[in-house]
C-alpha cells in the first residue's frame, strides 16, 4: 500500500528510535494508522551492552540495527532522520531543526542523557556512555592509555595514565569497571614490553553506602566482593567534588588519572521541557495513569522521559528497557483500539508494570540476579544475564554474533575489537620519551586530554539499569 493510499489514516508520530519508540511502531504494524518515526540517528542501539563496545569486547555493529531495515517491510511506517526540538501541542505540531510534522497522536520516547548534577563542564574529562560515539571515545581513551604508558619514562606519569576511574556504582559503573579489570589483567597480559598491564588501577567511586543500590544488600555485597577479586578498588561514600584534566577530587583528596568515565546520573531529554507541563527534577514529564499528558490525551510519553507511577503497585516505574517496552505496547493498544472504534473512551486503561526482576554482570562467570521470588549470584546468574541480554537484541544476526563473541572471549579472554580509532595524538604528545631522538620525531602540537568532544545525548530509554 502506498503512502498516498494511507493519507486519510490517523497520523501517529513517534519521537525516538530506542526501545520505546521501536516497540510502539512495531506494535502498530496492523493498525489502520500511518506512522512517522523520527530519530536523530539512523540506528537503534542496545544500550545495556554499550559498555562492552567501550571495553573492546564487541563492535558497534554487533549491538546496533539500522532503523530503516527494521521497518523495511512495515508499509505503514515512514522513517525520518531528523532532530525534534519542540512540540506545539495546541496545534499538534512537532518542530524539527529543518521543518515541522503534524500529528493526530504523538508518542514521545526521546530518552535521557547524562546528568552531571550541575557540573556540565566535567563532561569533556569524564564522558558518559549513552551512544556509540560515547562508547568509541571511551574505548579510544582506554586503549590509548596503555599505549601512552608503554612510552612513558616517568613512573608517576605512567601511574596516572594507568589509573582508570569509573564514577557511579549502578549496573553500568559496575559492569564497566569489571570489564576494564578483565581487559587489563587478562586480555592485555602479554601485549606490552615496558609495562605490566596488570598494574593498571581500576577504581569504582560510589557516593552511597553500597554498589548496585537497587539490589538487595546481600547481592550488593556479593557484587563488591566479585569486583575486588577482579582487582577493582571500590570506594563507597565517596563524593566527587571536582574533575579536571589532572584527575578527580574526592573530598580533599585528588586522585590523578587521565581516564575518567561518568556513570552516576541521567537527565531526561530536553524535549520534555518544551511541552510546557510539569516535569520533575530529572526533567521527566508527569503523565496520567494511561501514560498521556493531562489535557492532551493524544500525546503520550514513555520510557526515560516519563515520570510514571505504576497503577498496580503505586510505585514509580523504573527507567529500564523492559518498562519502556511495556509502556510502548500499552500505548499502541490504546491507539489501535480508538482508531478501530472511532471514539475515545471516557476512561482509558491504566498502565500496569510487570517487574520480572533485575540483573547485572560483574565479569566472567560473575553476575547477580533478583526476581520476585529468587535472588542468586555466580556462574548461573551470569548464564541467565547472557541469555536475557541476547534475547533483547534486535535481529537474529546480532544475537548469534554476540553469543559467539562471548563464547570465544570466555575461552580465550581475547577482546577482538581492540581498535584505536579517531585522534591518536594523545599517545604521541602526553608521554615523556626518555630518548631525545624519539622525542624529536613527534613534535606536533600537544593535545590536552580535557579537550575531547563532549558526550552527546541519545534518543533512547536509559538501559543502564538492567532488568529482565
Image (cartoon, helix red, strand yellow):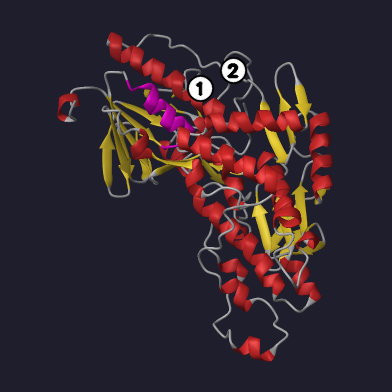
Give coordinates of residue 98: x percent, y percent: 28, 49
Q: In which quarter of the image is residue 109?
A: top left
Considering only vertical position in the picture, is 228 above or below 220?
A: below
The relative height of residue 248 versus residue 382 in the rendered view (above or below) is below
Question: Per the image, is 96 magenta?
Answer: no
> Which disc, if any, is residue 117?
none
The part of the image, by quadrant, that contains residue 390 is top right
Q: Which residue lies furthest to the left in this view?
A: 4
Mark 1 lies on a secondary structure that is: helix
The residue located at (53%, 34%) in the rendering is 304
Residue 263, given in percent of the width and then of the height, sits at 65, 47
On screen, residue 281 versus residue 293, left or right, reads right
Residue 124 seen in render: no
Residue shown at 29% from the left, 8% from the top? 341
Identify the residue at image location x=62%, y=73%.
427
Residue 433 in picture, x, y percent from top left: 69, 82
Dot 2 corresponds to which residue? 354
**Labels 1 & 2 near each other (Cβ < 8 A):** yes
Asked if the stretch drawn in magenta spans residue 17, the answer is yes
**Numbered badge on residue 326:** 1
Instruction: Write the start and end of the magenta stretch as one range.
Output: 16-29
Assign the N terminus to one quadrant of the image.
top left
Q: Is mark 2 on a helix, strand or loop?
A: loop
Q: In this view, does 148 lie to the left or right of 391?
A: right
Q: How crowded is mark 2: few (under 14 residues within 10 Å), some or many (20 or more)?
A: few
Neighbourhood count class around disc 1 (C-alpha, 10 Å): few under 14, some 14–19, many 20 upward = many
The answer to whether residue 9 shows anywhere in this view is yes
Amino acid at each position: 500500500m502506498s503512502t498516498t493510499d494511507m493519507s486519510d489514516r490517523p497520523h501517529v508520530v513517534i519521537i525516538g528510535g530506542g526501545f520505546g519508540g521501536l516497540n510502539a511502531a512495531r506494535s502498530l504494524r496492523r493498525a489502520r494508522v500511518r506512522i512517522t518515526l523520527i530519530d536523530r540517528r539512523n540506528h537503534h542501539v542496545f544500550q545495556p551492552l554499550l559498555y562492552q563496545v567501550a571495553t573492546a569486547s564487541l563492535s558497534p555493529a554487533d549491538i546496533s540495527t539500522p532503523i530503516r531495515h527494521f521497518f523495511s517491510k512495515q508499509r505503514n511506517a515512514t522513517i525520518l532522520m531528523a532532530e525534534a526540538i519542540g512540540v506545539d501541542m495546541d496545534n499538534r505540531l512537532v518542530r524539527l531543526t529543518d521543518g515541522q510534522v503534524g500529528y493526530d497522536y504523538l508518542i514521545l520516547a526521546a530518552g535521557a542523557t547524562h546528568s552531571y548534577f550541575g557540573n556540565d563542564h566535567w563532561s569533556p574529562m569524564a564522558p558518559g556512555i549513552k551512544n556509540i560515539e560515547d562508547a568509541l571515545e571511551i574505548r579510544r581513551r582506554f586503549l590509548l592509555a596503555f599505549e601512552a604508558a608503554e612510552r612513558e619514562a616517568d613512573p608517576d606519569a605512567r601511574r596516572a595514565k594507568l589509573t582508570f576511574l569509573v564514577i557511579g556504582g549502578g549496573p553500568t559503573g559496575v559492569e564497566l569497571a569489571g570489564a576494564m579489570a578483565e581487559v587489563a589483567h587478562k586480555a592485555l597480559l602479554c601485549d606490552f614490553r615496558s609495562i605490566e598491564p596488570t598494574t593498571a588501577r581500576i577504581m569504582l567511586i560510589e557516593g552511597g553506602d553500597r554498589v548496585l543500590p537497587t539490589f538487595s544488600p546481600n547481592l550488593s555485597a556479593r557484587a563488591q566482593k566479585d569486583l575486588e577479586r577482579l582487582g577493582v578498588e571500590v570506594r563507597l561514600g565517596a563524593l566527587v567534588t571536582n574533575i579536571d584534566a589532572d584527575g578527580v577530587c574526592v573530598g580533599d583528596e585528588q586522585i590523578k588519572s587521565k581516564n575518567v568515565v561518568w556513570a552516576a546520573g541521567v537527565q531526561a531529554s530536553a524535549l520534555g521541557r518544551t511541552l510546557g507541563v510539569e516535569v520533575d527534577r530529572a526533567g521527566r514529564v508527569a503523565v496520567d495513569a494511561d501514560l498521556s499528558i493531562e489535557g492532551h490525551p493524544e500525546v503520550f510519553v514513555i520510557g526515560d522521559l516519563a515520570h510514571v507511577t505504576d497503577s498496580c503497585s503505586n510505585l514509580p516505574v523504573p527507567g529500564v528497557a523492559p518498562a519502556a517496552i511495556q509502556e510502548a505496547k500499552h500505548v499502541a493498544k490504546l491507539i489501535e483500539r480508538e482508531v478501530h472504534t472511532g471514539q475515545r473512551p471516557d476512561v482509558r486503561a491504566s498502565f500496569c508494570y510487570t517487574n520480572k526482576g533485575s540483573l547485572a554482570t560483574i565479569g566472567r562467570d560473575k553476575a547477580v540476579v533478583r526476581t520476585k521470588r529468587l535472588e542468586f549470584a555466580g556462574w548461573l546468574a551470569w548464564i541467565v544475564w547472557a541469555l536475557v541480554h541476547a534475547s533483547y537484541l534486535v535481529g537474529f544476526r546480532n544475537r548469534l554474533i554476540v553469543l559467539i563473541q562471548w563464547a570465544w572471549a570466555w575461552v580465550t579472554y581475547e577482546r577482538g575489537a581492540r581498535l584505536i580509532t579517531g585522534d591518536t595524538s594523545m599517545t604521541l604528545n602526553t608521554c615523556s620519551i626518555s630518548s631525545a631522538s624519539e622525542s624529536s620525531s613527534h613534535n606536533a602540537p600537544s593535545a590536552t586530554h580535557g579537550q575531547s568532544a563532549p558526550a552527546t545525548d541519545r534518543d533512547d530509554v536509559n538501559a543502564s539499569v538492567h532488568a529482565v
